[in-house]
Image: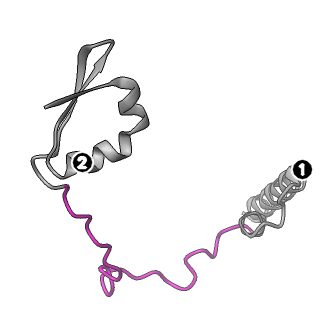
Amino acid sequence: MKQINLYEAKTQLSKLVDRAAKGESFVIAKSGTPVARLVPLSEPAPEKKKIRFGGMEGKIHIPDDFDWSTPQWLIDAFEGKYDGDPEGLENARLEHERAEAAKDAAKAKKK
């Protein structure tokens, strides 16, 4: 096993890794004292699993009106209407809350 100094390992790391992948092993030394070992993997890296789209097709159903209760101010925020305007977003949210509170009060009054 070849010994190399830390500076050389730092400057030649890419080449050393390529050589290790081909089966070579190295001892890395700092001030002449061995501190680490660079060796080839004994097992190849596992293959990445491929993503399979459509695996839930036919198993779930999202109705067309699934977002019917999403307030317009929130939809506008997601669509970027209030980008760079946090006060405008907060004002829209507060306006929505006041309108909802007024609706609730009107319902309570009818009962």
Residue 19's label in the rendered image is 2
Q: Which region shows up in magenta?
A: 45-71
Residue 36's place in the image compared with 98, above or below, is: above
In the rendered structure, the answer to whether residue 27 lies left or right of residue 55 reads left
**Residue 88's spot in the image, x, y percent?**
90, 56
User: Residue tagged by mark 1?
Assistant: 87
**Residue 94's spot in the image, x, y percent?**
84, 52
- Count up the numbered dots: 2
**Quarter of the figure that contains the N terminus:** top left
Residue 8's place in the image compared with 15, above or below, is: above
**Most foreground residue, 98 or 83:** 83
**Quarter of the figure that contains the C terminus:** bottom right
Label 1 vs label 2, nearer the camera: 2
Could you tell me the amino acid type at mark 2? Arg
Q: Residue at position x 63%, y 76% from top?
A: 68
Q: Residue at position x 38%, y 30% from top?
A: 8
Dominant secondary structure of the residues highlighted in magenta in the image: loop
Sequence-wise, the earlier of marks 1 and 2 is 2
**Residue 33's spot in the image, x, y percent?**
25, 12
**Residue furthest left as drawn:** 42
Residue 111's label in the rendered image is none
Check if residue 9 falls in the magenta segment: no
Label 1, secondary structure: give it: helix
**Most foreground residue, 89 or 63:** 89
Disc 1 residue crowd, few under 14, some 14–19, many 20+, Cα 10 Å: few
Label 2, secondary structure: give it: helix
**Most foreground residue, 79 or 75:** 79
In the rendered structure, the answer to whether residue 75 lies left or right of residue 11 reads right
Could you tell me the amino acid type at mark 1? Glu
